[in-house]
Image (cartoon, helix red, strand yellow):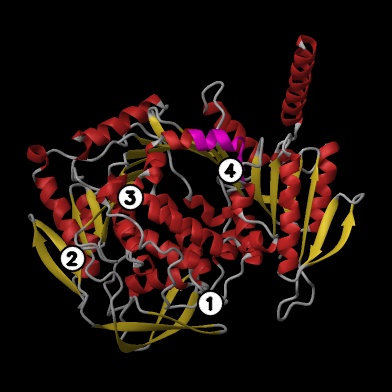
């Protein structure tokens, strides 16, 4: 009996060791994936991630009984509106629950131009029987949707299904999957699956791990990580390739009009950003969340400056003097400040604006018209304004109740090197504008852009290939002038009524800053605080800001290029309330505009449909108690920028 017990125990021990060795010996996703991988999200240990996340305040929030209706509804929406390619592969996220015994990774690949593919890799060593059931389910799901198994390849290891053709398709899409060597792989690209299968047993030379941007970003994040610590999430992105691949994988329902931003940035040298990648960890201790990111952008060989063309605007020198200024009110939602030299960047803005708008000479024409048009302000923007600016830019945000799509407010502050000269330039540019009202606030001149309908001048520039119109300048008759470099172009203008851009915005030069606010009330708040800062105290004296700065110092923030501070319960308040009322697509905040651009259907002037139904969310007071202050700092390095960010316990 005893012998049988010890024999059984020995067998169990041997099997356990074998499984452990298989998991240990299994290759990581970056060794299996090709060098053409443009996006990777990897979880080394799903169970550990879940365990650690549950201990954080974010995990506690999701387990709060008040959140149960929304969480359940969110899961339902996720299943109903899941990723298109995941559905095409016959797989759902719930199929992966409890399946991996090691790493699970999702990747976006760009096999060639105008191609995109999605790959799922899961280490299921020791759990092969459950994995086989998942593959059987995948096959059944594909057959239900009209798919048919067309062949098995690589020694009958890879199962290939052909999906029904859609209208306009000449070639049917396929999906492929296999279970081998303890690895489960599913993709919508058969060729890539075949290569991954080979890489399990034979080293792959063209793998993701060999890509310099990936290798350097992972190594830099590992260097900053405490010894013995394993990140809960690893990720990587090659931005241009990823966007291009995703356009193929999940194309917009309507073709977007206007210039292609990705192509424009490519032409202007922004491919200097070769990739970015990072680590994310969760903990119930000091940091609820800690993320580190390397933006890999080494100097371009043989370039006259660091980069080529307009990408040279990406210069953010480090300094020790990036603490909150005295004029920053103590109750702001977010505060961000960065070293950036406007004077040095100015020459590169013209080509960038022209490329992004698709309008050659637009920037040059605006600058020259502002200076030379006899009916305009006759302001030399570069010499009278930009030359007198400093090298620091600060952004603060807050909001006003009741919450509406217009509640978010922001203020931009550009440091001045010569405050009087900047004030004179601003006055020169504003005083004759009929849509601008001059006001006195706290002893300073404020220029308010009104929301009333005004006669906006439409400038039509006659250029080769057609006309370009914009509404920035006033020209009452045809004029000829030299835009520079000996070029002469004919201008003509016509009046048309229109709504002014940045309605209710305001501009002021005060306290060594050029202030530009999205709302005059926001500017008034800052000016009133600045005049009483000694009595009231500023942001840098608040306990939340002090705690965040202390943690930044502990994480190595000495000489930095940028610092960000957030009261997350304020930062996300407007977003939360708009999600709850399904009005997020109407938001006029920066986040709202970005989401509308990214998630819209591509039709100009339309409001996108809400992607998430938030009506089951509880009142914000039930959520805010879980949201602590957050901080981020950026350090400029020889090969790019290193970003460290965290969220502290409430």
In the image, 495 versus 139, the foreground residue is 139
Between marks 3 and 2 in the image, the one whose residue lies nearer the viewer: 3
Work out whether mark 3 precedes mark 2 in sequence or the reverse, and give the earlier one: 3
> Is residue 594 rendered to the left or right of residue 535?
right
The answer to whether residue 426 is visible is yes
Q: CA distance from mark 1 to mark 2?
A: 34 Å
> In this orientation, which residue lies closer to the viewer: 126 or 112?
126
Nearer the N terminus, badge 3 or badge 4? 3
The residue that appears at 44% across and 43% down in the rendered structure is: 316
Q: Which residue is mark 2?
A: 447
Q: Which mark is residue 235?
A: 4
Q: Is residue 576 magenta?
A: no
Image quadrant in which the C terminus is located: top left
Indicate which disc residue 66 carries. 3
Q: Nearer the viewer, residue 89 or 567?
A: 89
* Mark 1: few/some/many CA within 10 Å (<14, 14-19, 20+): few
Label 4 CA crowd tier, 10 Å (few <14, some 14–19, many 20+): many
Dot 4: what SS?
strand
Cα gap from disc 3 to disc 4, whole angstroms: 32 Å
Label 4 vs label 1: CA separation?
31 Å
In terms of image quadrants, where is residue 606? Answer: bottom left
**Residue 47 drawn above or below residue 307:** above
Tag 4–tag 1 contact (CB < 8 Å): no
N-term mark: 4 or 1: 4
Within-10-Å neighbours for mark 3: few <14, some 14–19, many 20+: some
Over which residues does the magenta segment extend?
40-51
Q: Earlier in the sequence, mark 1 or mark 2?
A: 1
Q: Look at discs 4 and 2 and give the one toward the viewer.
A: 4
Q: Report how far apart the C-alphas of labels 3 and 1 lie in the structure.
A: 43 Å
Say which residue appears at 72% left-offset and 57% top-offset. 138
Q: Where residue 40 appears, x then y in whole percent?
A: 63, 47
Q: Does 482 sit above or below residue 56?
A: below
């Amino acid at each position: 009996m005893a012998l049988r017990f010890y024999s059984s125990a020995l067998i169990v021990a041997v099997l356990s060791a074998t499984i452990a060795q298989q998991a240990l010996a299994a290759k990581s996703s970056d060794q299996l994936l090709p060098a053409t991988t443009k996006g990777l999200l990897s979880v080394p240990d799903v169970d550990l991630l879940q365990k650690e996340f549950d201990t954080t305040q974010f995990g506690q929030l999701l387990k709060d009984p008040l959140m149960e209706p929304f969480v359940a509804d969110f899961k339902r929406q996720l299943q109903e509106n899941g990723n298109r390619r995941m559905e095409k592969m016959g797989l759902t996220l719930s199929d992966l629950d409890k399946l991996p015994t090691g790493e699970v990774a999702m990747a976006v690949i760009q096999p060639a131009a105008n191609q995109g593919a999605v790959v799922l890799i899961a280490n299921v060593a020791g759990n092969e029987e459950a994995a086989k059931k998942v593959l059987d389910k995948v096959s059944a799901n594909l057959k239900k949707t009209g798919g048919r198994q067309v062949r098995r390849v690589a020694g009958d290891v890879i199962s290939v299904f052909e999906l029904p053709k859609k209208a306009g398709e000449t070639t049917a899409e396929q999906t492929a999957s296999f279970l081998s060597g303890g690895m489960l792989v599913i993709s919508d690209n058969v060729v890539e699956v075949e290569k991954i299968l080979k890489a399990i047993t034979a080293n792959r030379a063209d793998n993701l791990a060999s890509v310099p941007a990936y290798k350097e970003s992972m190594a830099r994040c590992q260097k900053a990580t405490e010894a013995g610590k394993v990140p809960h999430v690893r990720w990587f992105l090659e931005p241009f390739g990823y966007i291009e691949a995703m356009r193929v994988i999940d194309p917009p329902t309507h073709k977007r009009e206007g210039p292609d931003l990705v192509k424009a940035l490519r032409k202007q040298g922004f491919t200097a950003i070769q990739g970015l990648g990072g680590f994310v960890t969760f903990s119930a201790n000091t940091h609820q969340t800690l993320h580190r990111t390397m933006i890999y952008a080494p100097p371009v060989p043989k370039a006259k400056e660091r980069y080529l063309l307009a990408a040279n605007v990406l210069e953010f020198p480090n300094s020790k003097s990036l603490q909150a200024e005295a004029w920053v009110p103590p109750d702001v939602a977010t505060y961000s400040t960065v070293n950036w030299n406007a004077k040095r960047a100015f020459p590169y803005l013209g080509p960038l604006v022209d490329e992004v708008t698709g309008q050659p000479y637009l920037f040059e024409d605006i600058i020259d018209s502002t200076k030379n048009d006899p009916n305009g302000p006759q302001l030399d923007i570069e010499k009278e304004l930009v030359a007198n600016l400093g090298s620091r830019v600060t952004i603060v945000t807050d909001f006003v109740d009741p919450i509406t799509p217009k509640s978010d407010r922001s203020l931009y502050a550009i440091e001045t090197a010569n405050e009087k000269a900047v004030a004179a330039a601003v006055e020169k540019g504003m005083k004759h504008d009929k849509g601008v009202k001059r006001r006195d606030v706290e002893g300073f001149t404020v220029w308010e852009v009104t929301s009333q309908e005004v006669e906006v001048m439409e400038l039509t520039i006659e250029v080769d290939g057609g006309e370009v119109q914009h509404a920035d300048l006033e020209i009452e008759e045809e004029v000829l002038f030299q835009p520079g470099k000996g070029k002469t172009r004919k201008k003509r203008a016509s009046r048309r009524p229109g709504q002014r851009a940045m309605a209710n915005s305001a501009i002021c030069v005060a306290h060594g800053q050029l202030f530009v606010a999205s709302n005059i009330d926001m500017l008034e708040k800052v000016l009133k605080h600045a005049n009483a800062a000694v009595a009231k105290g500023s942001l840098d004296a608040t306990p939340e800001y002090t705690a965040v700065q202390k943690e930044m110092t502990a994480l190595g923030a000495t000489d930095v290029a940028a610092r960000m501070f957030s009261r997350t319960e304020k930062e996300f308040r407007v977003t939360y309330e708009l999600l709850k009322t399904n009005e997020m697509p109407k938001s006029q905040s920066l986040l709202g505009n970005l989401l509308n651009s990214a998630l819209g259907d591509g039709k100009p002037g339309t409001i996108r449909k809400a992607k998430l139904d938030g009506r089951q969310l509880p009142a914000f007071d039930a959520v805010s108690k879980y949201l602590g202050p957050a901080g981020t700092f950026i350090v400029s390095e020889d090969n790019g920028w290193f970003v460290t960010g965290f969220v502290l316990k409430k």
